[in-house]
Image (tube, grey):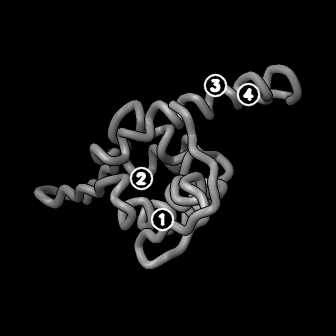
């Protein structure tokens, strides 16, 4: 697919963007959104599962990012209240699932960089 590069202005959600890449980064930009989303590509996860998987995120940041991803329509939050303890699961929406190829491509590129230029500590 050829990307058209020309000067223009795009408005989305009352914000102005000069490039469609900027719109994409509005959804997945920042340090944590794409990380959360890549873990959800393999299926729904509970809050604590995500927290354990993302070892360097704080609880507050995870909570805020999950709320933003839900607000943006990329994930759903399902609360089970039938019996204690309260159970909350997060999953990709159909809109969020459209990001899977992009997220996997980013993750694959990151693996190449990690292998060639980084130290992996397990």
User: Are the two marked residues, 4 and 2, in contact with CB atoms closer than 8 angstroms?
Assistant: no
Res 18 quadrant in image = bottom right
Of residue 91 and residue 112, the one placed in the foreground of this image is: 112
Q: Residue at x 42, y 66 (%)?
A: 67
Which residue does the numbered mark 1 point to in the structure image? 63
Disc on the earlier residue, 3 or 2: 2
What SS does tag 2 mark? Answer: helix
Ranked by sequence position, the earlier of labels 3 and 4 is 3
Q: Which of the marked residues, 4 or 2, is nearer the chain's N terminus? A: 2
**Residue at 50%, 38% in the rendered image:** 38
Asked if labels 2 and 1 touch by Cβ distance under 8 angstroms, the answer is yes
Closer mark to the observer between disc 3 and disc 1: 3
Residue reaching furthest left? 82
Mark 3, other Cα within 10 Å: few <14 / some 14–19 / many ≥20: few
Tell me the distance, in whole angstroms, between the alpha carbons under discs 3 and 4.
18 Å
Where disc 4 sits, the SS reads loop
For mark 2, what is the residue? 47
> Mark 4 = which residue?
122
- Which of these two is toward me, 73 or 2? 2
- The answer to whether 9 appears left or right of 97 in the picture is right
Q: What is the x, y in percent for residue 16?
A: 54, 73
> In the rendering, at what x and y percent does residue 88 appear?
30, 55
Residue 68 higher or lower than 53, as above or below: below
Q: In this rendering, which labeled residue sits more in front, label 3 or label 4?
A: 3
Q: Which residue is mark 3?
A: 108
First in sequence: mark 4 vs mark 1 = 1
- Give the left or right position of residue 75, taking residue 9 as reference: left
**Is the Cβ of the residue at disc 3 closer than 8 Å to that at disc 1?**
no
Q: Rounded to the nearest whole Å, what is the CA distance between mark 3 and mark 1?
A: 26 Å
How many other residues sit within 10 Å of disc 2, few (<14), some (14-19) or many (≥20)? some
30 or 60: which is nearer to us? 30
Q: Position of residue 55 (x, y in %)?
A: 64, 46
């Amino acid at each position: 697919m050829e990307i058209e590069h020309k000067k223009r202005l795009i408005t989305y959600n009352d914000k102005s963007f000069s490039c469609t890449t900027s719109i994409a980064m509005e959804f997945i930009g920042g340090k944590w959104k794409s990380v959360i989303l890549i873990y959800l590509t393999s299926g729904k996860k509970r809050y604590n599962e995500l927290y354990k998987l993302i070892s360097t995120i704080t609880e507050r940041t995870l909570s805020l990012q999950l709320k933003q991803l839900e607000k943006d329509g990329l994930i759903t939050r399902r609360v089970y209240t039938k019996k204690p303890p309260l159970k909350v699961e997060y999953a990709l929406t159909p809109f969020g699932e459209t990001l899977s190829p992009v997220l996997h491509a980013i993750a694959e590129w990151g693996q190449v960089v990690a292998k060639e230029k980084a130290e992996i500590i397990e």
